[in-house]
Image: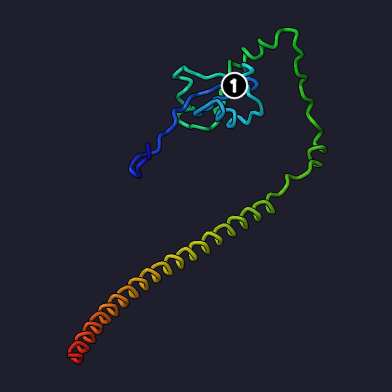
């Protein structure tokens, strides 16, 4: 069945999907598993591998459905549960020894964003200039199309008037010829 211009496009129903990422779960609201894989940036079908799943718990679905297509990360478990999962024999990180003050003085300065910011501004300025130039051309095109329509109407009226004048002149001539012949 053909769509009419008054029909609104159908929105696809969103589903919520989840996959573990480290100590977090990554949730996303998408119309399909393929959409979820794209949102996560997965390069293989982690649903087929049993790593990802669809979520049906309304509490877990609430935030992802409010922000479709956006990956929402939630911590899975508490800090204590994470430490307990490591086990008693798991190696513990060693305490970091403070570095001498001289080492901090030698640290390289943070890179400057000046060149990047300037390039971004230049790109935005160029995009704006291009949009404005295209808008001016579009206005000229619309004006020329209006002129073309007006000219066609004028020519049609002129042709109609001249056609009527030709018919009248032809009738007058034929009458004069008949009168002359008789």
Judging depth in this view, the residue of 175 and 7 nearest the camera is 175
Residue displayed at 62% across by 12% down: 81
Residue 165 vs 53, above or below: the answer is below
* Left or right of residue 117: residue 156: left
Where is residue 35? Give x, y as percent. 55, 30
**Quarter of image, res 3:** top left
Q: How are the residues colored?
A: rainbow
Residue wearing tag 1: 19
Instruction: Tell me residue 140's x, y (percent).
Output: 46, 68
Q: Is residue 181 shown above or below 8? A: below
What percent of the width, then of the height, locates residue 104? Answer: 78, 38
Q: Nearer the viewer, residue 114 or 106?
A: 114
Q: Does 137 sit left or right of 107 as displayed?
A: left
Crowding near the residue tagged with mark 1, few <14, some 14–19, many ≥20 C-alpha atoms within 10 Å: many
Identify which residue is drawn at 64% across, 14% down. Answer: 82
- Residue 37: image quadrant is top right
In which quadrant will I find the C terminus? Answer: bottom left
From what the image shows, is residue 122 above or below residue 62? below
Which quarter of the rendering shows the N terminus? top left
């Amino acid at each position: 069945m053909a769509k009419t211009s008054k029909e609104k496009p159908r929105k696809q129903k969103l589903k919520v999907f989840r996959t573990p990422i480290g100590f977090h779960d990554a949730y996303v609201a998408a119309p399909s598993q393929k959409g979820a894989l794209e949102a996560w940036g997965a390069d293989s079908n982690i649903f087929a591998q049993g790593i990802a799943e669809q979520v049906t718990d309304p509490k877990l679905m609430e935030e992802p459905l409010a922000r479709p297509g956006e990956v929402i990360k939630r911590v899975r478990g508490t800090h204590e549960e994470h430490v307990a999962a490591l086990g008693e024999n798991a190696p513990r990180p060693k305490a970091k020894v403070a570095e001498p003050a001289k080492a901090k003085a030698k640290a390289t300065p943070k890179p400057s964003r000046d060149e990047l910011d300037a390039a971004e501004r230049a790109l935005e300025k160029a995009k704006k200039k291009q949009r404005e130039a295209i808008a001016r051309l579009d206005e000229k095109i619309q004006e020329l199309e209006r002129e073309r329509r007006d000219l066609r109407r004028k020519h049609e009226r002129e042709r109609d008037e001249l056609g009527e004048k030709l018919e009248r002149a032809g009738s007058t001539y034929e009458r004069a010829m008949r009168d002359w012949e008789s």
